[in-house]
Amino acid sequence: MIILGITVFGLYQFGVPQKFMPAVKVGDRTYSVAEYSYYYSSVFQSYVEQSQTLQQSYGYTVFDYTKDPALQTTTDEDGKTITYDELFRQRVIETLEASNYYLNKCASENITLSEENAKQ
């Protein structure tokens, strides 16, 4: 029983379950927790960089990357107040939708990676 517990803990620490657990389905593709987290981190990092640039250039920022995005609000395109976490989640879905579009377009036109790119 102890060995099973240690094994499960070890697998979890190395992110094995996250690679297989579904997080979101966009179109006909299902993205794992690990994939979703990657895209969320990318969106978050983009806002951090924008925030740092504003701070350095103009002395102010609208997003405080040192605080929880779920506790900070902004306004969406419709003028509705939402949290930055909600905004980031929306951006992730938009990114995945765009990726799906291009993946489907490539598949329909039989466009594949070269051998060299596939190896990378």
Image (spheres, grey):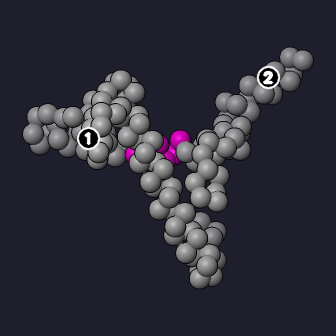
Say which quarter of the image contains residue 49. Answer: top left
Say few, some or many: other residues with alpha carbon within 10 Å of mark 2 (under 14 / 14 to 19 / 20 or more): few
The answer to whether marks 2 and 1 mark residues whose Cβ atoms lie closer than 8 Å is no
Residue 44 visible? no
Circle 1: residue type: Gly
Residue 45 drawn at (x, y percent):
37, 42
Q: Nearer the viewer, residue 75 or 116?
A: 75
Say few, some or many: other residues with alpha carbon within 10 Å of mark 1 (under 14 / 14 to 19 / 20 or more): few
Residue 63 horizontal side relative to residue 112, left or right: left
Residue 76 drawn at (x, y percent):
30, 42
Circle 2: residue type: Ile
Q: In what element is the residue under mark 1?
A: loop
Q: Nearer the viewer, mark 2 or mark 1?
A: 1
Q: Is residue 59 above or below residue 91?
A: above
Main SS class of the magenta portion in the image: helix
Q: Earlier in the sequence, mark 2 or mark 1?
A: 2
Q: Is residue 50 above or below residue 60?
A: below
Residue 34 horizontal side relative to residue 93, left or right: right
Query: Going 52% across and 45% down the picture, which residue do you hit?
Result: 38
Query: Going 52% across and 67% down the picture, which residue do you hit?
Result: 101
Q: Which residues are magenta?
A: 37-43
> Marks 2 and 1, how far apart in space?
49 Å
Residue lying furthest top: 2
Report the disc number at residue 6.
2
Q: Quadrant of the N terminus?
A: top right
**Number of marks in the rendered image:** 2
Magenta highlight on residue 50: no
Residue 107 drawn at (x, y percent):
62, 75
- Residue to which mark 1 is pinned: 79
